[in-house]
Amino acid sequence: MAVARNITGLNWHIDNNVLTRKESLDLFRMAELGWLSLGISSRIEVEHLDAKTEAKKIELAKRRLPFVTSLAPLHTGHSILGSSVLGSDEDDARLKRVYAALWPKADFDSDRSQWKKRTMGRSRFRDSLLVSDAIRYCASAFVTHDPGILEGSERIRNTFDQFDVISIEAATLLARSRIEKSRRFALLQPSNPLTRELPTWP
């Protein structure tokens, strides 16, 4: 996907579940045309390595390829050496705030320790890591299809000013709105090099 141009200024990280949903295709096309930027955390690879067959692992790896990948802070059992960076105290503090906002009734240390097998605790902890990674790399939103994460969107917004957790559908509507604004701006500024030759779709 094109990454050199981001006409609308929208810069989002996407969840693992967004990669495989048909509802995401318009967003992917918008990113490919340079309307917006979509990124992923390198941590998503950990989830893909859990796929049951080698063919599925290869398919998921291909789905990751078009996206800008941010190197995630290292967490034992939730990261891959060579695709991670050493985290800081700031990273740890942010993660704990994200976790508390998303899962106020769950236990951080208990969920963090459940990396060896598939459990709800492991899922909660990894979801928190993905949202924290998005904030670390200055994305303005995290796009997901996960109802549990979406349920915590207001608490995330209250904890992290100017950061949103949004659904695929909401992201698509927002992107279309920004694209329309960009087209109107282009009409007002025909000599502006940033708005010349805008993509014809959508």
Image: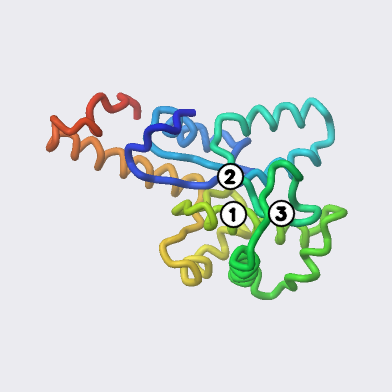
Callout 3, which amino acid? Leu
- Residue under label 3: 74
x 71%, y 27%: residue = 59
Q: x, y (%) of residue 160? A: 48, 67
**Which type of secondary structure does the marked residue at label 2 adopt?**
strand
For the point 64% across and 69% down, the residue is 96
Q: Secondary structure at mark 1?
A: helix
Name which residue type carries label 1.
Answer: Asp
Q: Residue furthest right?
A: 116
> Residue at the spot x=53%, y=47% of the render?
13
141 horizontally vs 86: left or right: left
Q: Amino acid at mark 2?
A: Ser
Q: Is residue 149 above or below residue 46?
A: below
Measuring from the top left, give residue 76's x and y in whole percent: 79, 56
Which residue is denoted by mark 2 in the rendering? 70
Residue closer to the observer: 106 or 173: 106
